[in-house]
């Protein structure tokens, strides 16, 4: 098959390139995706009258026989997709700066990943999925140490692997609740669970199922399962009709952009939020509902790409430590380089690292890093059948290795900076349609607001017709979530297409 | 590599065998695993003084650097494992009748699955994981229709794919809550969500986050995340220190085994439970906490392999329908053939099928089947980034195809029946250590009680030293969870080893 042959050539080429890089100590700050994806399209090409085209629609209709198709944007031909470009079932080529809701790190059909997929190790791992907590494979430690553990955030060298972002956040939250109660017992000189706790938890009642709560931020998003959905405050449609835990939330600081231009006003808004966080912790403790954990995204993504300053997060860390509240940093969307550092929270330069850092999406593997002292007191307390998936750990190892070898985090910081500047220019020229540009010094994790939801949706739809897949978030925001291999060529295309569409909307 | 060559030969052999079978209309009722796994060991071989052996221990210690190793049973060498036999890092060969907590359906390193893993389709699916709800792949409908949908239980032809069993149960539960509220609105002639609902759900408060509850059974197990853990009532250690929803549970009927010998007593016990279910539904409605859903395992697995009669489940279906309570059948552990029918609930011959059937484990893919009328009113209500994993859907398609071609469900029913009879004989001879044998006419889904937890643990440990990996459940039960390829040869070994160990414990 031509495609397979092409891939093999591309793979050989990358390997050589990677090897030559590995001998250098300073990988180039800018990455050109064509060196790895020689057949990557240079431009979008939409050949149907509409997107989705007729073939996409036909396949959607077939899916509708068994599954809800109403959120379909297009049906993709993943075999033909390449690098930054998503090809759809009608053969249209889209520059993809949404990347499966921020989940593709190093491009479609990356040769190194396809090569990994064809190895015996991968096949064996895929087809003999273990119960990792009880029968781990003999390569588990090696895979994790060379991969996920090699990028463990400072202060959180332990790892619990899960299946997805919601599971990662809930796993961390469970560990936080267990650690909180363990600390309370220790402080009270109690050695073990009481009989009352053992019995009451079987009835979902206190004290065994404690009245502890978790604190999150309004407009935050942490997942869709029952615990994570109780933390999530993005949109009513995510939460309606689902019973929820009576857990508190405080508003995100009402920051203005660019952050540095409004530094003093923002500092005041952030201080008010920190005060509210502290008030909530204290008032809930008085009600017998102690806040055991606080969860926060470095940038609120689904909720509208809401930023805050490093000082805000430093203050959060201080207030959580003062009140013995475990801090969970949800890096499901911000992690793995897109913000210009491997973990977005690195930029805060905290004196005391968070207790938990959760990840998923671009890492393909999911789970949480944690401080050693938050390991539960007994085995089987945080446990489940699969506890993650070895093939996703192998994939993470491979993509981390590529990111490091090619300096993709530095590359993303550099390209993001230029992109931000160019978008600033566009925002000035099209001030009626681009407001509140944000994400300066935040890699390619950039967003802006349209005038309203209708205009935003019109913009995204028009871009899609031009062959650029973009994402929306919050009430009226457009968010950029390109891959880490997004470079000069793609930036040029994106800006050109945006300008064309903005002209028609102005 | 020798192993790869062996595999290729085995694959070719199976393919021919499968093709020859496909032309017959009546696959043989008994399956001999050596026809597919020519190199499968014939007997366990333990060559270390203890299990885990020194190499397993060394690798466990390496994992302990970052992850809790206290639930490790052994470290496995999956590349060397074959058919019914799990090989550990020390080269010990174990007959595995636990199968990764009931998750391996058709054997370690099944040639068809390894062949699938090496296809371009699999590699592309693995390395370009889509957001299935918005950008499904062009082969998604075909994969699902040929696989997961081809075994959809009667009455539940729609499918929501998720990542694991906990997620499957929580997804079904979310859909049940949404459907319940939708029906209430319809009955009240209300068209849309109220402003109050939209606003209150953002604060996790009623009416938007309703006071609805879900009913489960004591000693049931439905998962480990916050919603599913509130349904779970297996062991305190699973639940302690984790906040829970105030959801009710009723005791499982106190059935005696063999079920048919105690038919009238059991019928009374079951009737008492049904009455309790109805009382709970009524009393909770009076408190403003309507029961929207009931979840039940066909056999309570983790909780101790507790059975009930088809009449019990028929009555459950009647009472749930009478009170408008959605019925979720949790087939995460019972599904995919092990009970001698593809779905355990088929045997109940319900007049009205359940509203939801959840699956995971042996299917490798996870999710829930549901009645068409339980699809949520709007897109993005039951939705998440990945919504399952295409490679697990491909794997499910392949293993379903093998199960069908080789009549493995009928095989398991037949071998299970013989195994049950043989175990009855053992239970008579070793009546001090084998009590309450259960699982007659339930395939290989068989269990019994030891005198107490200590004796049970001693038995399982002694069997492990003999090279048989077995599982425990409940307070003092041993459960058999062999694969669907467990046949005469393996039964012979199992019984021989059991007898040897039982002698020493008697």
Image (cartoon, coloured by chain):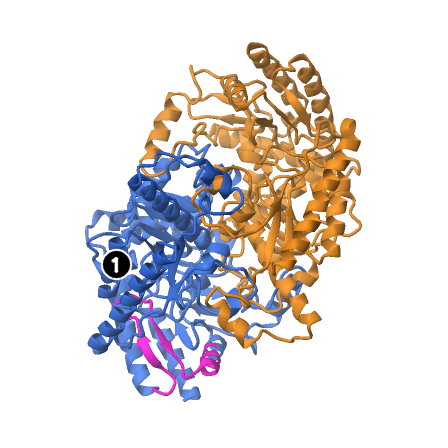
Chain colours: A blue, B orange
Please state the horizontal and vertical placement of residue B239, each as a whole percent of the image: 48, 42
User: Would residue B487 be visible to someone looking at this image?
Assistant: yes
**How many numbered discs?**
1
Please state the horizontal and vertical placement of residue B358, each as a whole percent of the image: 62, 48
Query: Does residue B36 appear left or right of residue A279 in this picture?
Result: right
* Residue nearer the viewer, B482 or A466: B482
Q: Confirm whether the magenta stretch covers residue A454.
A: yes
Residue bearing mark 1? A319
Magenta range is A431-460
In this view, A411 is above or below B444: below
Please state the horizontal and vertical placement of residue B454, each as a whole percent of the image: 51, 21
Query: Does residue B82 appear left or right of residue B413 in this picture?
Result: left
Residue at 44% x, 21% y: name it: B51
Secondary element at image label 1: helix
Please state the horizontal and vertical placement of residue A466, each as a whole percent of the image: 47, 77
Chain bearing mark 1: A
* Residue nearer the viewer, A370 or A335: A370
Q: Confirm whether the magenta stretch covers residue A367.
A: no
Residue B212: quadrant of the picture: bottom right
* Residue nearer the viewer, A238 or B249: B249
In this view, B501 is above or below B321: above
State the quadrant of the C terminus of chain B: top right
Q: How many residues crowd mark 1 within 10 Å: few (<14), some (14–19), many (20+)?
A: some
Residue B95: quadrant of the picture: top right
Residue at far bottom of view: A506
Query: Does residue B490 appear left or right of residue A393 in this picture?
Result: right
User: Would residue B369 be visible to someone looking at this image?
Assistant: no
């Amino acid at each position: 098959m031509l495609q397979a042959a092409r891939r093999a050539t591309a793979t050989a080429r990358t390997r050589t390139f990677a090897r030559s890089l590995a001998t250098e100590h300073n990988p180039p700050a800018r990455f050109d995706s064509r060196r790895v994806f020689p057949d990557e399209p240079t431009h979008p090409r939409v050949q149907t009258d509409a997107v989705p085209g007729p073939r996409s629609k036909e396949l959607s209709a077939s899916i509708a026989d068994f599954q809800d198709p109403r959120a379909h944007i297009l049906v993709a031909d993943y075999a033909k997709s390449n690098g930054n470009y998503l090809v759809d079932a009608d053969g249209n080529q889209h520059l993809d700066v949404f990347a499966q809701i921020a989940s593709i790190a190093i491009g479609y059909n990356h040769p190194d990943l396809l090569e990994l997929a064809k190895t015996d190790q991968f096949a064996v791992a895929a087809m003999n999925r273990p119960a990792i907590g009880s029968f781990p494979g003999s390569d588990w430690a090696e895979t994790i140490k060379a991969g996920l553990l090699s990028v463990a955030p400072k202060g959180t060298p332990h790892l619990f692997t899960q299946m997805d972002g919601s599971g990662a956040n809930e796993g961390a939250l469970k560990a936080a609740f267990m650690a909180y109660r363990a600390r309370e017992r220790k402080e009270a000189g109690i050695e073990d669970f009481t009989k009352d706790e053992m019995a009451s938890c079987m009835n979902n009642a206190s004290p065994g199922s404690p009245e502890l709560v978790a604190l999150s931020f309004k407009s935050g998003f942490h997942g869709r399962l029952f615990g994570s959905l109780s933390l999530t405050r993005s949109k009513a449609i995510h939460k309606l009709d689902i019973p929820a835990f009576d857990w508190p939330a405080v508003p995100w600081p009402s920051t203005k952009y660019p952050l540095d231009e409004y530094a003093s006003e923002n500092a005041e808004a952030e201080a008010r939020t920190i005060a509210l966080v502290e008030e909530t912790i204290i008032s809930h403790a008085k009600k017998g509902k102690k806040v055991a954990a606080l969860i926060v995204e470095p940038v609120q993504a689904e909720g509208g790409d809401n930023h805050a300053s490093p000082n805000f997060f430093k203050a959060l860390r201080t207030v959580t430590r003062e009140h013995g509240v475990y801090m969970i940093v949800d890096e499901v969307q911000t992690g793995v380089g897109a913000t210009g550092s491997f973990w977005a929270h690195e930029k805060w330069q905290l004196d005391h690292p968070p207790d938990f850092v959760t990840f998923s999406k671009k890492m393909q593997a999911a789970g949480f890093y944690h401080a050693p002292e938050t390991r539960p007191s007994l085995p089987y307390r945080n446990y489940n059948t699969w506890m993650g998936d070895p093939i996703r750990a192998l994939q993470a190892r491979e993509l981390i290795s590529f990111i490091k070898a090619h300096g993709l985090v530095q590359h993303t910081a550099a390209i993001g900076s230029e992109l931000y500047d160019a978008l600033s220019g566009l925002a000035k020229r099209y001030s009626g349609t681009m407001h509140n540009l944000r994400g300066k010094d935040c890699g390619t994790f950039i967003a802006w607001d349209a005038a309203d939801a209708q205009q935003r949706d019109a913009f995204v739809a028009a871009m899609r017709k031009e062959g650029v897949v973009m994402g929306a978030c919050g009430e009226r925001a457009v968010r950029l979530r390109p891959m880490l291999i997004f470079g000069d060529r793609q930036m040029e295309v994106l800006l050109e297409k945006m300008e064309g569409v903005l002209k028609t909307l102005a």
